[in-house]
Image: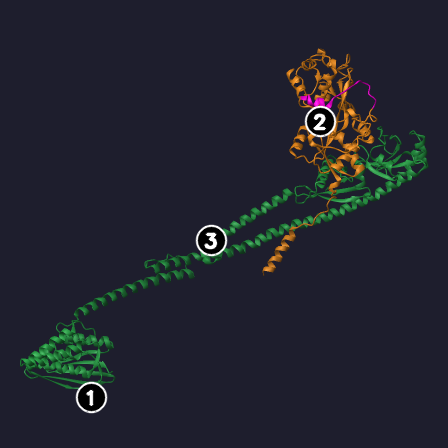
Chain colours: A green, B orange
């Protein structure tokens, strides 16, 4: 993961954009939803608790009154005597019954039951015919205790009865009340959105606002509690809240319809998830496109650069953008082209240099061989009585030595010495038909000049100037001109033809036919010292010529 | 930075947690009991509620068919403590599933109604009776088992398949016992049925009541219950005499609440409960001091013997088809 991150600028950009887009979205999604759900549930819970309090309060209040009536009737002598006497026709008993139960009859049916379980007096419209079993149910319990016993009153009612005992303790009968469906409705007067369920101590249904479901629901909840499972489960459509009701182990259960049932929650979560997924995909796409848009030209540049490094100089970046990255790409293209052409010309120059070097090396002869041969010629001249031959050989050896030596610049003194020797040779050749005068002041002797540059001038003066004359005269002198050194060679020969003169004086000299030496001298000086220095010539046809070398004073 | 983030996450989680709503009251495990029964709620309901009221034990009831419940019990997957209302033959045949009890059998319970191995106790008595529809049968009502062989009633007798219904098996055994002097009683009876075999014994009463059949062989409590519901059924004790076979209750081996199961059995055999059963559920008590005096001849029914010879009897039944 880290490697992926660090590898590419684009990946970092992509991840950042994605994160920025996604994190707030998810947080909002999850947080809002959770907050909403839990807040709603909390509000509903508070509401339920309040409702339960109201209902149980109402129940307790009314129950107290009902019980008070029963207690009154149980203690009444009229009731006792009516029971003792038997029968169902005691007017006073009825009167008492109705009097005591005034105002309460909408909540319960009061009954007076004899010891065998027959109902003898009732506030209901009709005397129930069925005999009750006094050894069973609520009557049995009433007979076992003093006070009111509560239990199922038959026909889906809740009964509360108290035994009427004689002074001796035997049971004369029972007084109590039974509350039916309609009476429970009035007792609780529930007007909320949910439903009620009233169960006894072992979770058998006593009353429910939805009578058809009451039994099934109480059984289901009872099974849950007996098995130790959570009371409220996610798959229920209602939330159940319980509160103890009254003093007889009755429990009131409030069924509150869930604002967010399992199905609704599932739908919400599914939708939220799908939306989140959609947004995630969208963010992914946008982040991808954005990062590519930004980094594509950079990566193209990168790869082009790589290609150039490998040696492919023809690569160019296709570019349509006008922004900074576009400018960069254009610059790259130009730079590559320039580099390519530079490289090519450099290669060309190198090739030329190599050729020159080869030529040069080919031209170099083994100097030792030359010296030895000249030496032999000298000794042979001496031994054979030809001192001029020895002199020629010696001079030539000396000139050769200088010309092959590695030093490019030599003192003027040494160059003049070389010219002397050259002249010695030429005197012998040309049989003293000319004279050469060298006049160089002491201060110039130490100046450094390129070797073999004065010699061609003298040679030219001899060969083209005074060679055919009887009294040829060459003068060589030096002159200082500012920081430059001027070396003149004058002869009184035929002169240089105008066109040749022109070519000699032109700055861009082409090789004049037959004047190679002058050209070389000029070239060498030019290469050493630059374009301001070199060879110039003056001439008067028939009178003579003067060739001048201009050098910097070193 | 990390701490802030962690705090934020915690807040997020808390926002998701709702406070627990008020719970119902959970009974301690020692105060529960699970009963498996084939009986209808109208029969076991009052009994169970009275037991709960008297003892405070939370009693849950699982209804089901006898074969299903026993299959599960054999596989060890039945979560009941007590089986209630199963026929005597069935209980005898599956004694290995039950644990012996320590409850003292009240003296009022006839010894013949008990199993000798101390594995199950009788619950209520089931009497085999003849029933007929008084609207359809004005003259010459059936008087005994011999009437069932009378070809006059051919095709008009309602009887359940003894292969499927244990009550029908009991009735068939009683018939065999009562008509033991009559040879070929079974083939004759079968032929007289003319192919009529109902699925359940409770269908017998309803079919006679709605007039599909004229007479039938049923158990007394079914007939009485139907009568209480308003159906027109006449009950006849066969003149040859008839048998009383108890249905029983047994505690399963290795159940979770054996003590509460025994309490239930004790309560079920108490005088109050037996009388209550008679009054509330129209069942015939198994206690002699709770039931009304018999007005017929009681034939002795050998429960283990009937269980043992069940297969052979059924083979004879099938052969007579």
Question: How many angstroms separate mark 1 from mark 3 (CA)?
Answer: 85 Å
Badge nearest the viewer, 2 or 1? 2
Residue pushed farthest top?
B151
Judging depth in this view, the residue of A209 and A494 nearest the camera is: A209
Q: Are marks 1 and 3 on the same chain?
A: yes
The answer to which of marks 1 and 3 sits earlier in the sequence is 3
Task: Give the class, few, some or many, for how many residues have Cα within 10 Å of label 2's Cα (few <14, many ≥20).
Answer: many
Judging depth in this view, the residue of B293 and B310 nearest the camera is: B310
Q: Which mark is residue A289?
A: 3
Question: How many angstroms separate mark 2 from mark 1 (CA)?
Answer: 156 Å
- Res B64 quadrant in image: top right
Task: Give the class, few, some or many, for how many residues have Cα within 10 Å of label 1's Cα (few <14, many ≥20).
Answer: few
Judging depth in this view, the residue of A206 and B98 nearest the camera is: B98
Judging depth in this view, the residue of A248 and B82 nearest the camera is: B82
- B306 within the magenta span: yes
**Above or below: residue A472 compared with residue B145:** below
Element carrying mark 1 = helix
**Above or below: residue A357 compared with residue A203:** below
* Magenta residues, start to end: B292-310
Element carrying mark 2 = helix
- B101 within the magenta span: no
Q: Are marks 2 and 1 on the same chain?
A: no
Q: Residue at x 53, y 50 (%)?
A: A280
At which x and y percent is residue A497? 12, 76
Instruction: Write down the residue under mark 1.
Output: A442
Residue pushed farthest front?
B117
Badge nearest the viewer, 1 or 3? 1
At which x and y percent is residue A437? 13, 86
Instruction: Write down the residue under mark 2.
Output: B92
Q: Is residue B188 left or right of residue A456?
A: right
**Above or below: residue B278 compared with residue A493:** above
């Amino acid at each position: 993961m880290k490697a992926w991150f660090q590898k590419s600028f684009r990946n970092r950009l992509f991840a950042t954009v994605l994160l920025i887009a996604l994190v707030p979205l998810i947080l909002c999604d999850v947080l809002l939803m959770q907050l909403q759900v839990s807040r709603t549930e909390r509000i509903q819970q508070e509401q339920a608790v309040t409702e339960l309090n109201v209902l149980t309060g109402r129940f307790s209040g009314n129950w107290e009154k009902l019980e008070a009536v029963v207690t009154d009737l149980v203690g009444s002598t009229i009731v006792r005597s009516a029971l003792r006497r038997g029968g169902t026709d005691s007017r006073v008993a009825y009167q008492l019954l109705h009097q005591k139960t005034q105002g309460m009859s909408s909540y319960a049916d009061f009954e007076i039951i004899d010891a065998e379980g027959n109902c003898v007096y009732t506030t209901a419209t009709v005397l129930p015919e069925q005999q009750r079993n006094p050894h069973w149910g609520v009557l049995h319990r009433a007979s076992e205790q003093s006070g009111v016993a509560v239990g199922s009153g038959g026909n889906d009612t809740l009964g509360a009865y108290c035994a009427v005992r004689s002074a001796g303790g035997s049971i004369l009968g029972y007084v109590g009340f039974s509350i039916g469906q309609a009476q429970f409705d009035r007792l609780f007067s529930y007007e909320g959105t949910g439903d009620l369920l009233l169960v006894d101590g072992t979770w058998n249904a006593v009353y429910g606002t939805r009578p058809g479901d009451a039994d099934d629901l109480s059984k289901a909840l009872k099974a849950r509690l007996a098995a130790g499972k959570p009371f409220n489960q996610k798959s229920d459509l209602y939330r159940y809240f319980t509160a103890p009701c009254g003093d007889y182990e009755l429990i009131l259960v409030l069924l509150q319809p869930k604002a967010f049932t399992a199905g609704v929650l599932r739908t919400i979560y599914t939708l939220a998830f799908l939306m989140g997924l959609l947004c995630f995909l969208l963010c992914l796409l946008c982040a991808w496109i954005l990062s590519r848009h930004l980094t594509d030209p950079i990566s193209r540049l990168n790869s082009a650069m790589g290609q150039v490094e490998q040696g492919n100089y023809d690569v160019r970046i296709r570019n349509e953008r006008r922004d900074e990255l576009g400018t960069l790409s254009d610059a790259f293209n130009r730079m590559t082209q320039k580099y390519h052409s530079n490289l090519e010309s450099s290669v060309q120059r190198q090739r030329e240099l190599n050729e020159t070097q080869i030529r040069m090396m080919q031209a170099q002869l083994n100097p030792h061989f030359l010296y030895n041969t000249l030496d032999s010629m000298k000794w042979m001249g001496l031994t054979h009585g030809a001192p001029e031959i020895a002199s020629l050989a010696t001079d030539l050896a000396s000139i050769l030595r200088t010309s092959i030596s590695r030093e490019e610049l030599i003192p003027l003194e040494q160059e003049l010495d070389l010219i002397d020797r050259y002249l010695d040779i030429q005197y012998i050749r040309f049989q003293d038909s000319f004279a050469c005068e060298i006049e160089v002041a002491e201060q110039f002797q130490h100046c450094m000049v390129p070797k073999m540059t004065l010699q061609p001038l003298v040679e030219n003066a001899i060969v083209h100037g005074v060679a055919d004359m009887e009294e040829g005269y060459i003068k060589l002198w030096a002159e200082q001109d500012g920081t430059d050194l001027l070396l003149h060679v004058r002869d009184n020969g035929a002169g240089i033809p105008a066109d040749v003169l022109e070519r000699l004086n032109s700055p861009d000299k082409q090789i004049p036919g037959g004047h190679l030496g002058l050209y070389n001298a000029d070239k060498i000086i030019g290469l050493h010292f630059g374009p301001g220095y070199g060879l110039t010539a003056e001439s008067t046809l028939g009178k003579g010529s003067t060739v001048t070398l201009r050098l910097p004073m070193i | 930075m990390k701490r802030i983030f962690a705090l934020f996450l915690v807040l997020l989680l808390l926002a998701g947690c709702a406070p627990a709503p008020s719970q119902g009251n959970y009974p301690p495990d020692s105060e529960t009991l699970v009963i498996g029964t084939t009986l209808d709620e109208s029969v076991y309901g009052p009994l169970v509620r009275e037991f709960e009221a008297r003892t405070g034990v939370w009693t849950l009831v699982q209804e089901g068919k006898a074969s299903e419940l026993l299959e599960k019990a054999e596989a060890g997957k039945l979560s009941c403590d007590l089986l209630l209302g199963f026929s005597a033959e069935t209980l005898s045949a599956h004694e290995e599933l039950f644990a012996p009890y320590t409850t003292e059998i009240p003296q009022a319970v006839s010894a013949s109604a008990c199993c000798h191995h101390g594995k199950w106790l009788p619950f209520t008595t089931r009497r085999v009776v003849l029933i007929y529809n008084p609207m359809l049968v004005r003259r010459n009502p059936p008087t005994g088992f011999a009437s069932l062989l009378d070809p006059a009633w051919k095709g008009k007798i309602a009887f359940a398949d003894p292969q499927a219904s244990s009550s029908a098996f009991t009735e068939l055994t009683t018939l065999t016992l009562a008509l033991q002097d009559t040879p070929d009683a079974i083939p004759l009876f079968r032929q007289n049925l003319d192919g009529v075999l109902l699925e359940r014994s409770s269908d017998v009463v309803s079919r006679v009541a709605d007039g599909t059949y004229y007479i039938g062989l049923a158990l007394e409590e079914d007939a009485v219950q139907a009568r209480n519901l308003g159906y027109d059924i006449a009950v006849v004790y066969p003149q040859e005499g008839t048998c009383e076979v108890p249905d029983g209750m047994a505690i399963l081996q290795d159940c979770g609440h054996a003590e509460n199961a025994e309490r239930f059995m004790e309560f079920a055999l108490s005088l109050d409960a037996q009388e209550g059963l008679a009054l509330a559920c129209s069942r015939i008590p198994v206690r002699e001091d709770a039931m009304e005096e018999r007005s017929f001849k009681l034939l002795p029914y050998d429960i283990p013997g009937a269980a043992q010879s069940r297969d052979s009897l059924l083979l004879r039944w099938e052969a007579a088809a």
